[in-house]
Each structure stands twice: as C-alpha cells, then as structure tokens.
C-alpha cells in the first residue's frame, strides 16, 4: 500500500482533522511516511486565517512539486482544509501538479478519492461542496503506534486528546475568513461526543479538549437551552460524569458565550480546568464594534473578573489583532490599557491581514505596515513582561500537573500542564506519563514553570 505524509498548518481544529484523515487512511492500509521525501501521497492541510499561512503552504507545495514530483512522478499531491475550501480549483490552475483539492466538509472522502487517483479513474479531484452531516464525520482517532513513552503501559492513545464537537461559525467578525472556509455552525449530538470520549478514556486518555470554531455556540440550534443551561454547559455536565476522565478543556470559546451558566460550571464541575482562552481582539469599543464582535470592553473585563471570582487561580489567555483598518493610536492605547488591566497569562498578538471577501478588507483607512509592526512589537513586549511576572509569582506555590511526556527541550525531563494550562518541567527518570502529580513550583522562565514532585 502507498504511504502518506500529512503536513498541518494552523489551529488545533486542523490538527484534529489531519489526525482523522491519517486514521481513515491507516484503516485503508496506507502506511505513515516519516517524511515527504519517501511518501507516495503528500497532503498539506491548510490554514487561511492570515495571508502568511496561505503563502507558507503555497510555497511548500511549489517546492514539493519541483523537488519531489519531478523525480517521482507517481507521487500524489493534495491540498486539504481551509485554503482548499476558499480557493478551490484556482489552486490547480496555479499549481497544475496538484491532484487533489479537498474542502473542509470533505475530509472523510480523502481515502476514496486517493483510491480513484491511484486506480486512474480520475486525473484530478476538486471537491469543496458543502455536505449535510459532515460535522459528525470527524471521529476516528489514530491509535498510538508503539513509539510513545506510554505505549509500554498499555495505553492506546496519548494522555490528552482533542474531540471535535461542532463545526463552522455564524458570528461573521468582519476580519475573519472562518465562516467562509468552515461554513455555518453545525453541532454533533451529546451522545456521539460522549461515546467518542468514553472510548478515548478507556484507551488511557485523561484529558479531553473540546474543539470547535466557536464552542460556546455548541448545539444552539440543534439542542437549545434547558433549565437555564446552554447546550454547551449541558455537554460539559455530561462529560464531567465520565469515570476515569480527569480533565476537561475547550477551545475556542467566544466571550459573548460566557453566561452565568458557564461561569457557574467552573464552580460546579470538578473536571473543568481553571483555564480560558478568551479572544478579545481589541480593547477599543469603537474597534470591537467595527469588528462585529458582539461585546464591549466592559463585558469582557466583567467575565474575566467573574471567572476569577469563582476560581482565583484561573489562567486567562487571549488573541489580539493589531492594525485593524481605521485603528488609531488612541484605539491601540485602549488595547494596551486592557492588557494592563486584565493581566493575561499570555496573549497571541497578530498583525491584521486582509482576507479577500471579508467586510474589513474593503474598509477605509488601512493602517500602514510600519505602524502595525511598531504596535505589534510594543504589545508583545508588554504581554511578555506581564507573562514573566505572572509566571514568577507561581514560584513557591504548589500545583497539580498531568504529565504528558518528555520535555520538548530536554528529553531527560518530563513535562506536564497545570489545570490553569501552564507548562511545568520536572526532573525524573521513571515514566510518569499520564500521572497526575502534585508538584512544588521551584522556578519560572518565559511561559514555562519548573517543579519538583511532592514526596
Ligand atoms: N488578520 C489577523 N489575525 C486574524 N485572526 C483572525 N483573522 C485574522 C486576520 N484577518 C486572528 C484572531 C483569531 C485568531 C485565531 O487569529 O485573533 O482569534
């Protein structure tokens, strides 16, 4: 059977989609290639959220076509995911070596199309149609292949797994391409999600991260609120009951989805981790309005303080865009002051990137590149300064970590995460993967803590 190499760009949703495609192909007998140089199928699962991500994947495919396709003409090349969805056939017009362009609602058909291509039944495939029910097709997980530190302990999957709960977004923020690449909101059923999660837990998974473009909108249409609880909170309640599951996380929520039912869930559900990635995008009400975010600064600051009131140890991170069209120095100063006020654990700071077809791309008063660069650097300095201070303040304290495996930087050490989602590196020889450990925090670097196990 042919071997396949998948390279993923972008968010965790894309990682999860790649994992499901890999599992689907493995079930058909495809081998996993260690690199593109030996693969018979090379798939790039793409991201469209900023131009840089698109350019990276395009350049990669150009290089692959030039270096690999020329020497091994039988190799199949494909684009999957968001850029495949937004650009479709245009990708083949631009790069005629590409055989397969598969949109975001068609991942489950990758195997069938590859069969067609190998059998010569089709020369090229472009499928970017919408497909009812596609949200329920991202199911298969890839069993671990005996190389993980935990495999000798009988676990089939990693310690921490992603579960897709919904697809698409109806928010239509003016800067964002996601509603066009991922389509309208569609949710899986609670029972489907529970079945998948139970299966993962029985394979050794201790932590589940629920995924969706806007998870707080989960089940709005299909399930609806009951007894004052949104469908999303009903799902959290159900997951909290899974025996053997230790931790529940989710990404990405929308700030407007933080009703009191969700705030209370942090108090009520012991498995729900004290951590929230809350994309704020800007600290200026004027900009938030033009972004069509659906909340103002006061609402945002309000939910962070409510969350910290119920869980003082809450880890809060965010995404911020600098240089949105028409952003003035005064607007930017509002963002700076918000970051000072909220004191995020960490923030991802993005330079605004116009996306074709989005309302913001046609807005007047684009911000000059040099100004965007300067604001980006200034904000990043502040984020790092606050992050350092917050991480240093953890030293001397105690935390529970879930050990994920060897430290990325130093394989002689182990790495885990606190419930607030801070990485802790600990010394250790024995395999503690999958263990929940109490650690004393003894040191801090930039966005990393160091600890020792409590004896
Ligand atoms: N330009 C820059 N950043 C963007 N994001 C989304 N769209 C754009 C864009 N056009 C950022 C937002 C979002 C994160 C995933 O990417 O901050 O939360």
Image (spheres, helix red, strand yellow):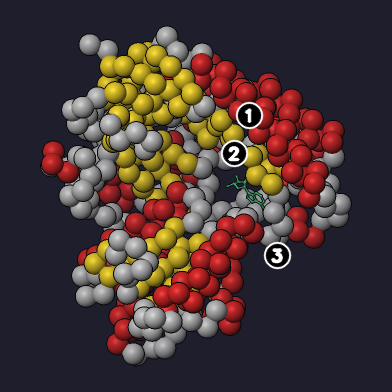
**N-terminal-most mark, 2 or 3:** 2
Residue sitting at 53 percent across and 64 percent down?
57
Give SS at disc 1. Answer: helix
Residue at 41% from the left image edge and 29% from the top image edge: 423
- The residues bearing labels 2 and 3 have C-alpha atoms spaced at a distance of 24 Å
- Residue 357's tag is 3
Residue 190 seen from this side: no
Q: Residues within 10 Å of mark 2 (few under 14, many from 20)?
A: some
First in residue order: circle 1 vs circle 2: 2
Q: Position of residue 98 (x, y in %)?
A: 48, 79
Q: Is mark 2 within 8 Å of ligand 1?
A: yes
**Disc 1 + disc 2, Cβ < 8 Å:** no
- Percent across and percent down for residue 154 are 13, 42
Frontmost residue, 271 versus 204? 204
The residue that disc 2 covers is: 348
Residue 302 in picture, x, y percent from top left: 64, 24
> Which residue carries the number 1 mark?
383
The answer to whether 1 appears left or right of 230 in the picture is left
Residue 161 in which image quadrant: top left
Q: Is residue 299 left or right of residue 43?
A: right
Quadrant assignment for the C terminus: top left
- Label 1, residues with CA under 10 Å away: few <14, some 14-19, many ≥20: many
- Look at discs 3 and 1 and give the one toward the viewer: 1
- Asked whether, in this view, residue 171 is left or right of residue 276, the answer is right
């Amino acid at each position: 059977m042919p071997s396949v190499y998948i390279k993923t760009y972008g968010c965790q949703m894309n990682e999860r989609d790649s994992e499901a495609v890999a599992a689907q192909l493995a079930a058909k007998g495809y081998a996993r290639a260690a690199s593109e140089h030996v693969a018979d199928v090379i798939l790039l699962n793409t991201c469209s959220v900023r131009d840089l991500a698109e350019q990276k994947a395009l350049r990669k495919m150009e290089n692959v076509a030039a270096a690999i396709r020329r020497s091994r003409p039988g190799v199949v090349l494909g684009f999957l995911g968001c850029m495949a969805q937004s650009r479709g056939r245009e990708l083949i017009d631009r790069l005629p070596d590409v055989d397969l362009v598969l949109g975001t609602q068609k991942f489950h058909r990758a195997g069938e199309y590859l069969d067609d291509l190998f059998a010569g039944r089709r020369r090229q495939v472009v499928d970017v149609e919408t497909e009812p029910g596609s949200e329920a097709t991202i199911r298969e997980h890839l069993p671990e292949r005996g190389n993980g530190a935990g495999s000798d302990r009988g676990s089939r999957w990693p310690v921490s797994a992603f579960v897709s709960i919904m697809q698409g977004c109806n928010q239509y923020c003016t800067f964002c391409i996601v509603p066009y690449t991922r389509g309208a909101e569609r949710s899986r059923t609670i029972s489907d999600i529970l079945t998948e999660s139970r299966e993962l837990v029985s394979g050794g998974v201790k932590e589940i991260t629920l995924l969706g473009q806007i998870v707080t909108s989960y089940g709005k249409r299909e399930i609806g609120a009951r007894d004052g609880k949104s469908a999303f909170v009903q799902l959290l309640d159900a997951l909290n009951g899974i025996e053997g599951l230790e931790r529940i996380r989710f990404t990405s929520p929308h700030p407007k989805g933080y009703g009191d039912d969700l705030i209370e869930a942090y108090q009520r559900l012991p498995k729900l981790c004290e951590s929230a990635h809350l994309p704020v995008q800007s600290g200026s009400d004027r900009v938030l309005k033009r972004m069509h975010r659906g909340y103002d600064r006061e609402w945002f600051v309000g939910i962070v303080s409510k969350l910290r009131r119920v869980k003082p140890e809450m880890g809060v991170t965010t995404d911020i865009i600098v240089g949105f069209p028409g952003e003035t120095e005064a607007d930017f100063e509002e963002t700076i002051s918000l970051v000072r006020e909220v004191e995020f654990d960490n923030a991802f700071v993005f330079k605004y990137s116009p996306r074709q077809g989005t309302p913001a791309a046609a807005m007047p008063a684009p911000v000059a590149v040099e100004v965007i660069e300067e604001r980006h650097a200034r904000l990043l300095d502040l984020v790092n300064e606050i992050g350092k201070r917050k991480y240093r303040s953890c030293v001397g304290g105690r935390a529970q970590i879930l050990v994920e495996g060897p430290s990325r930087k130093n394989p002689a050490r182990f790495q885990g995460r606190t419930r607030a989602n801070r990485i802790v590196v600990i010394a250790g020889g024995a395999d503690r993967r999958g263990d929940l450990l109490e650690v004393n925090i003894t040191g801090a670097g930039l966005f990393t803590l160091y600890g020792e196990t409590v004896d």
